[in-house]
Image (cartoon, rainbow, N blue to C red):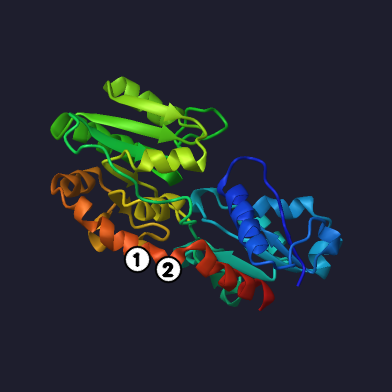
Amino acid sequence: MKLYINELQEGWICNRIKSEFEKVHHVACDDLLVQDVSDADTLWLLFGWGWMEIPPYYLESRKVILTVHHIDPSKLNASEFLIRDNFVDVYHVPNSKVIESFPKEISRDKIKVLPYWYDREIWKAEERPPEDRGFFHIGSFQRDTEGFDLCTPKLSKGPDLFCDIVEKLHSQYKKCKVSLSGNRRQYVMSRLEKAGIEYTYVEMADVNKMNYMYNFLDLYLVTSRHEGGPQAILEAAATKTPILSTNVGMADQVLHEDCIVDFSSDKFVDEIKKDRLKSKVDYNFSNVSKFELKTLYSEYIELFES
């Protein structure tokens, strides 16, 4: 097999997936990757619109694996999905929930579930700050705002729920501070400013900085409506960061059941007030180990070669 992986220079998860895969490929002394699509017999498309950048000849004459990270039903372009289906041999999804939103015309036999990985050489637990700091430190490290106007909330990520939770905690529980990273955070920052809640923002923190940021939190919140992972579930578990998440993506594969709640700000707040999430970090840490990069690398190779 000669594998070509397409490129996306947007600082999105696709870039990290590709670079981490290449790192393990190099360590394993494999000779599978090629830089030119014409030298490949297998194409791994890491983002959906990337197929339009590859000449049809190569799509028709090579095996094509397309990763579908998640699907927001409100934004699904079914007609484009079906046109692209003519060139796709295998759909890769990181969790089975994604399949529910596939167009009904797509054969489920073409869809393979293989979870995301994390790199334990990057994401690790470190010494945490004192518990009684006079504030409750909450983290969110993903985009929350639509790009077309930089003010409309990206509802698939649940920034409306995130802000509702933080505002209620700040007024009913403890003084809150929020750490943000990722691009397009305008919606959340605007809500926090209106509520008088202090926050820090590191726009595009590198992974080492983000590992430090996780280890400085009292709680990480995942408030999404639709997700592939998200990566934050793996990263929080690997860094022993307390986390509370909606039941999206890989949450039920990684987290203790007490770390998963319904899409309701009151239910999030009630669970946080129980103050039992810290006691679940060892469970999450143990459970996430099966998603380590070097473990899953061989399963991805099997997917490409099958």
Residue at the spot x=27%, y=35% of the render?
137
Question: Badge 2 is on which residue?
Answer: 290
Task: Determine whether 119 is above or below 147 in the image.
Answer: below
Task: Determine whether 279 is above or below 214 in the image.
Answer: below
Task: Determine whether 199 is above or below 38 in the image.
Answer: above
Residue 187: mark: none
- Label 1 to label 2: alpha-carbon separation: 7 Å
Kind of residue at disc 1 = Asn
Question: Badge 1 is on which residue?
Answer: 287
Question: 7 or 281: nearer the eye?
Answer: 281
Query: Split into 4 quadrants, where in the image is the C terminus?
Result: bottom right
Residue 154 in sight: no
Q: Is label 1 in contact with label 2 (beta carbons under 8 Å)?
A: yes
Q: Quadrant of residue 265?
A: top left
Q: Answer left or right for 116 relative to 10.
A: left
Residue at the spot x=50%, y=35% of the render?
205
Secondary structure, mark 2, is helix
Residue 121 in sight: yes
Q: Answer left or right for 236 relative to 48.
A: left
Question: Measured from the top left, where is residue 165 in percent x and y?
Answer: 26, 38
Secondary structure, mark 1, is helix
Question: Measured from the top left, where is residue 273 in percent x and y?
Answer: 14, 44
